[in-house]
Image (tube, helix red, strand yellow):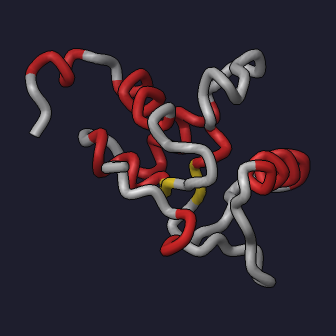
């Protein structure tokens, strides 16, 4: 349960704070972030990720560690290629259908 201080922090800041906790080589789903943060949906988490400025570096916020619940990258085109490259550089592997194995690479939020 969130205390009163956490509820006063703006939603996007709470989302970004959680994404910063995802360790290298792990991924988290939009919906998982929504459940942990509370008070939002997976779609809202997606909006928060989309709202990042182009000057946000991956060191500031590892946005690329957020994927969909099917274990796939939701971006298309160049965005897909960038996200996949960044994940692969951290050791995340994709199967033949471009899925990431949750048992191997999923982050539970308690590591």
**Which residue is rendered at x = 59% and y = 69% of the image?**
71
Q: Position of residue 63 (x, y in %)?
A: 62, 38
Q: Position of residue 39 (x, y in %)?
A: 25, 39
Does residue 97 appear left or right of residue 61 in this picture?
Answer: right
Does residue 41 appear left or right of residue 62 in this picture?
Answer: left
Residue 41 at least partly seen: no
**Which residue is rendered at x = 67% and y = 44% of the image?**
64
Q: Nearer the viewer, residue 98 or 107?
A: 107
**Which residue is rendered at x = 49% and y = 43% of the image?**
22
Q: Nearer the viewer, residue 74 or 86?
A: 86
Q: Position of residue 80 (x, y in %)?
A: 81, 53
**Which residue is rendered at x = 47% and y = 29% of the image?**
16
Residue 99 is drawn in which quadrant?
Answer: bottom right
Please state, as top left, top right, bottom left or bottom right, where the N terminus lies in the image.
top left
Looking at the rendered structure, the number of numbered marks drawn on it comes to 0
Q: Position of residue 52 (x, y in %)?
A: 64, 25
Up-down relation of residue 41 to residue 60 (above or below): below
Up-down relation of residue 78 to residue 10 (above or below): below
Up-down relation of residue 39 to residue 70 (above or below): above
Does residue 4 appear left or right of residue 30 in this picture?
Answer: left
Residue 38 at least partly seen: yes
Up-down relation of residue 34 to residue 48 (above or below): below
Does residue 30 appear left or right of residue 38 in this picture?
Answer: right
């Amino acid at each position: 349960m969130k205390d009163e201080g956490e509820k006063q922090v703006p939603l996007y800041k709470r989302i970004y704070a959680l994404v910063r906790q995802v360790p290298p080589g792990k991924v988290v789903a939009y919906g998982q972030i929504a459940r942990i943060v509370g008070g939002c949906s997976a779609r809202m988490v997606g909006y928060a990720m989309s709202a990042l400025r182009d000057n946000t570096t991956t060191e500031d916020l590892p946005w690329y560690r957020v994927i969909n619940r099917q274990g796939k990258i939701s971006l298309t085109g160049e965005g897909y290629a960038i996200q996949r490259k960044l994940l692969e550089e951290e050791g995340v592997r994709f199967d033949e259908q471009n899925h990431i194995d949750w048992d191997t690479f999923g982050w539970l939020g308690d590591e």
